[in-house]
Amino acid sequence: MPHFTEFAKSLGKETHTDPGLYGVYPRSVYRTNGGFVYMADNGAEDVLVVCNAEGFTGERADGALLAPLTHANACALRGLFPFTAPAKILSRDRTFGAGDRLGIAAPGHLRVFENCAVTPVLAQQSVRELNLTNRTFEDIVDAAAFAVFRAGYERGFGADGDHLKTMPEIQSALDAGCSMITIDCSDHIKTPREVAPDAGTERFYLNKVFHVEDEEIRFTAKDLDESRAIYSDAIEFIREVHGTFFSGAYRRPAELEISIDETQEATTPQQHFFVASELRRLGVDFATLAPRFIGEFQKGVDYIGDTDAFERDFRVHAAIAGHFGYKLSIHSGSDKFSIFPVIAKYAGTKFHLKTAGTSWLEAMRVVSVSDPGLYRDVHRFALESFAGARKYYHVSAEASNIPSLDSLGDTELPSLFDISDARQLIHITYGFILNDPELRPRLFGLWRRERQAYSDALYAHIGRHVEQVTGTPLRTGKE
Ligand code: ZN
């Protein structure tokens, strides 16, 4: 009989028992109407222990029900404890997308978010990420539910169907309980071309000064023509999505983010203003918008570009968002330490920052520290997969800039994660690595054993992101 079912008996007694002694997660102990539910460490995996609560399925043991972390039990948990379901949180100040590709990062993420005034979006995946990791929207929403229950985190979290391009993708994210969707308009954003004159928009935009907070926006005829040429189809697509899922009788309990960031060219202030203003004129309300800022936002490394120029650009975008009353969303926010102070200065509390890959990189850093042999195998495999992975990601990394494994002693392996080229190598090959039948079980076995080390690494690293983008130190961390 597992040790932790003993704890169930002690719950009925008057003497206070330390749940930690039984392998029970102390903050997961919840009483219900006449019963209780808690989560315990069952060795290779965690399990719910349920007594006198409806809806769970599992095995009877020692007078309690041992309910595995399945989708059905996640549904039961959400029914009983609404704080374990995603909530609409984008209207809150300071929100942070902490994507969890592996489904094991949330415990570390939650230690950060219970120590700061920032609300997390714990589940946040694009369809591409789901395909590369063999997961579904249900999987990621369920992983977040179990994590918040385990941590007793009741302040609410979001779930983001990220970078969705089609109606069926949006439908499946919403059906799985995502509390926000991010519409990726890139298939509808066109290159500049000739457009026929349009008296209505010309009357609205030309020969005017739009005062947005402390900034002024003026349109030349060329600005307007380009804005119409590039974004008109995207605006129509957004209107269609909004009409289908976010208005009328079938309105979903979810929030909308507009992403126009997946483009080569930066979004000009006029273009940003035009998109927001047209959507407002069409009655489309949305909570956040992600423009394409100047400079480069490559995965897993700091901002590449002139930070003074970024500051001048960001200031105007922040003013436009503030003027219309939505939050600015900053994508590929992992490790952009040199510009976090600029975000804090001009967006204030009105930002949504998305990260994802950096939590995966921290997981691999833990591998390099705790199992150098496994890390070497992964690294070699990543080098072989690099050319294939580059087709999907724009990165400047060159394999020739990465020190050869043979030149590094075991204790030097973690230093690879301080080199941009090596970070990007591991960053963009995650799908290849996780789909390898030999590496995958070894990696997940190690991450289970080293879960405290991974949680500590995330607390430090995501904590640093949060401290810099809020300008406020975390309160003392606790597990
Ligand atoms: Zn994006």
Image: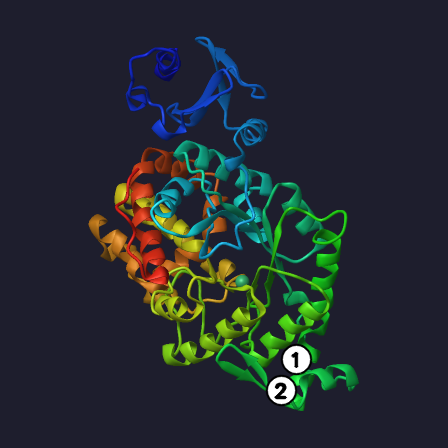
Would you call the spot at circle 1 few (<14 residues within 10 Å), some (14-19), or many (20 or more)? many
Q: Residue 68: percent from the left, percent from the top?
A: 50, 24
Pair 1/2: label in front? 2
- When the figure is inspected, residue 149 is found, relative to residue 256, above or below; the finding is above
Q: Do the residues bearing badges 1 and 2 touch, measured as CB atoms within 8 Å?
A: yes
| Residue 314 rendering spot, x and y as whole percentages | 46, 74
Disc 1/disc 2 C-alpha distance (Å): 10 Å
Residue plotted at (31% across, 45% down): 366
Q: Residue at x 35, y 43 (%)?
A: 111
Figure quadrant, ligand 1: bottom right
Image coordinates for residue 106, horizontal then vertical, percent: 42, 42
Q: Amino acid at mark 2?
A: Phe
Q: Is residue 70 above or below residue 196?
A: above
Q: Amino acid at mark 1?
A: Ser
Residue on which the image places disc 2:
219
| Count of numbered labels shown in the rendering | 2
Give 106 or 298, whichever is nearer the viewer: 106
Q: Observer-nearest residue: 25 or 396? A: 25
Residue 216 pos. (x, y %): 54, 84
Q: Secondary structure at mark 2?
A: loop
- Quadrant of the snapshot with the N terminus: top left
Residue 227: mark in rendering: 1
